Image: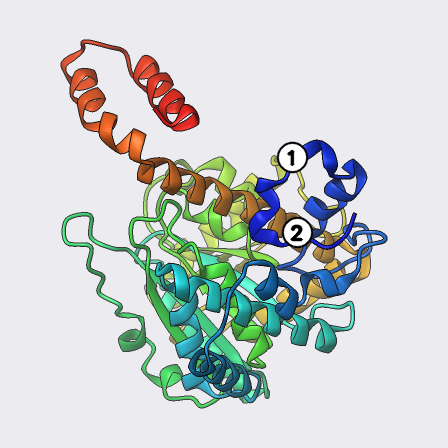
Amino acid sequence: MGSFRLFSFMERPLPTLDRSRTWRGRRAATVTMGLRCGPCRPTQMNDRDFSAETVISRRAVDLTDREKRVLDRLYDGLVGGQRASLAESITLVETLHPRKKELAQALLQRVLAYRQEQDKGQPAAFRVGLSGPPGAGKSSFIEVVGKMLTGKGHKVSVLAVDPSSCTTGGSLMGDKTRMTELSRDMNAFIRPSPTSGTLGGVTRTTNEAIVLCEGAGYDIVLVETVGVGQSEFAVADMVDMFVLLIPPAGGDELQGIKRGIIEMADLVVVTKSDGDLLVPARRIQAEYTSALKLLRKKSKSWKPRVMRVSSQTGEGVAELWETMLAFRDSGLHSGELQLRRCSQQRVWMWNLIQENALRHFKEHPAVRSQLPVLESRVTRGDISPGLAADLLLKAFSTGQ
């Protein structure tokens, strides 16, 4: 069929494309950002088709000498473990500037190629998602666990997502102030990011930030999310293990947490298990242990557990880490961890497609010209929302 440029893909008529290769191309794209595990690995596909140089040439990104120097500096500093380069790289992938987004993807492809050489078919880093209601002690828990892991020789990165104000768009970014000891640890990296209105409490680039952290040599990646609404489901689609943190509060705790969230949890941790809260913590542990028995298992090789820890005394922290390692070993042995990562990359690919498609839809000239009028008519009750949506979609598809 001959080589073709990625940016001109849509310009060619579809019948000229080989259907089988098109299918494999789509499937290969779903695992480009993840591991090339056995069941998800595309067959008869040249891996060089997704190298950084090929992607750059297909997208017609003519890098200037200055841009090449910037990418080389970021890449060299990143793989060298420099925290400043990692922070600057995450800032680059978080940008909404079209040109810088192209540069960010070029950097990500180089990091992915580097990670594939380092992993050699097995994930070298352990991704853990942490979520829970406000006041559950997530930041205190992360600091205690993070200090323990850096003391064992691990490099820990923390991607903390702070909620943005719907009114001003601002965010407090207070995680570094709550993790004072860990933020000063040279083997730890803490990156707070605003949600910027993203549904689910995780930023659209959190998944890419995880890749950059792993490229910088961090073998433990902790993702702390806003413990409200859809955040638990969003973070579960980007990590190897999802840990739900709950405080030993009073009342009927099982009514306060959705069943679907409990089903997503690989491990439930009751925090603040010390002092006067020790007895309530034991009661909550027993209640959740009983509740988990009634839920459908999502893994054939792992049975979710409920544990108690105290960030103040450190009790249960070492046992918790041993349990998390047992989960990781079980997933690696059964192959479920590799399959989970492949599935997660496919999910996030479609999430980004939906987000970008909606953005292009709103920016379309025909849509922008008709949107204010149709919105006004919908709010007055002149037409139904469904009819307005159909008219806007027709304007988008026809350009009129």
Graded by Cα atoms within 10 Å as few (under 14), some (14 to 19) or many (20 or more), the crowding at tag 2 reads: some
Q: Is residue 101 in view from this perspective? A: yes
Numbered-mark total: 2
For residue 13, which numbered disc appears in the image? Answer: 1
* Left or right for 368, reference 308: left
- Label 1: how many Cα within 10 Å (few below 14, some 14–19, many 20+): few
Q: Position of residue 267 (x, y in %)?
A: 57, 55
Q: How is the image coloured?
A: rainbow
Q: Secondary structure at mark 1?
A: loop
Marker disc for residue 29: 2
Which residue is painted at 72% across and 52% down in the image? 339
- The vertical placement of 144 against 235, above or below, is below
Give the residue at x 40% y 57%: 225
Q: Position of residue 393 (x, y in %)?
A: 39, 23
* Residue closest to the eye, 107 or 243: 107
What x and y, as percent, mark residue 254? 43, 39
Residue 63 lies left or right of residue 17; in this view the side is left
Q: Give the farthest residue toward the right.
A: 44
Disc 2 from disc 1: Cα separation: 21 Å
Q: Is residue 251 above or below residue 377?
A: below
Percent coordinates x, y for residue 322 in the rendering? 64, 71
